């Protein structure tokens, strides 16, 4: 195996590892977002956990975060929860940082 092949294999391995971390962090963020939103809607216990799972599943509708945002926004609107779009997006950003920290510190 040449030096180029070893380097390419190293980059491919790093890329796969980074994608795996990104997937795990996004799923963790979505769960945390679901729990946050559930609290805002007055849900607790098993109902909050079930809602958090719904938010995680919503992320599989399309690429990006818009599907998760629409899920939470729609549910807040249906329950008449007064939270702005900006607040939801800010919470998503903050929880992503929390999720990345949790994922990387658990290794």
Image (cartoon, grey):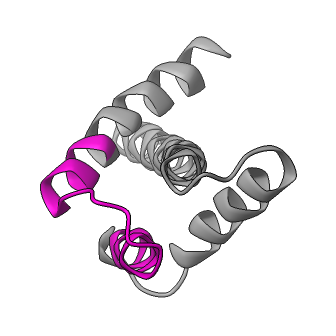
Q: Is residue 64 left or right of residue 17?
A: left
Quadrant of residue 82 in the image?
bottom left
At 42% from the left and 47% from the top, the residue drawn is: 15
Q: Is residue 4 above or below residue 94?
A: below
Q: Position of residue 97 (x, y in %)?
A: 35, 29
How many numbered marks does the figure carry? 0
Task: Report whether residue 32 is seen.
Answer: yes
Q: Nearer the viewer, residue 60 or 75?
A: 75
Residue interval drawn in magenta: 67-91
Task: Report whether residue 64 is seen.
Answer: no
Q: Position of residue 92 (x, y in %)?
A: 33, 47
Q: Position of residue 18 (x, y in %)?
A: 45, 42
Quadrant of residue 106 in the image?
top right
At 60% from the left and 49% from the top, the residue drawn is: 31
Characterize the magenta stretch by its predominant secondary structure: helix
Residue placed furthest toward the left:
86
Q: Is residue 69 left or right of residue 57?
A: left
At 38% from the left and 47% from the top, the residue drawn is: 8
Quadrant of residue 72 in the image?
bottom left
Q: Is residue 34 left or right of residue 78?
A: right
Q: Is residue 32 above or below residue 62?
A: above
Q: Position of residue 73 (x, y in %)?
A: 34, 72
Q: Nearer the viewer, residue 36 or 27?
A: 36
Q: Nearer the viewer, residue 61 or 89?
A: 89
Q: Nearer the viewer, residue 75 or 89?
A: 75
At 46% from the left and 20% from the top, the residue drawn is: 101
Quarter of the figure with the C terminus: top right
65 is within the stretch colored magenta: no
């Amino acid at each position: 195996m040449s030096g180029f092949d070893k380097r390419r294999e190293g980059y491919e391995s790093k890329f796969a590892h980074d994608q795996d971390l990104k997937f795990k962090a996004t799923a963790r963020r979505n769960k945390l977002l679901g729990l946050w939103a559930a609290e805002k809607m007055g849900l607790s216990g098993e109902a909050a956990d079930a809602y958090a799972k719904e938010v995680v599943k919503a992320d599989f509708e399309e690429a990006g975060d818009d599907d998760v945002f629409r899920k939470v926004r729609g549910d807040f609107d249906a329950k008449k929860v007064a939270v702005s779009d900006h607040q939801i997006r800010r919470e998503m950003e903050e929880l992503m940082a929390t999720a990345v920290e949790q994922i990387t510190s658990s290794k």
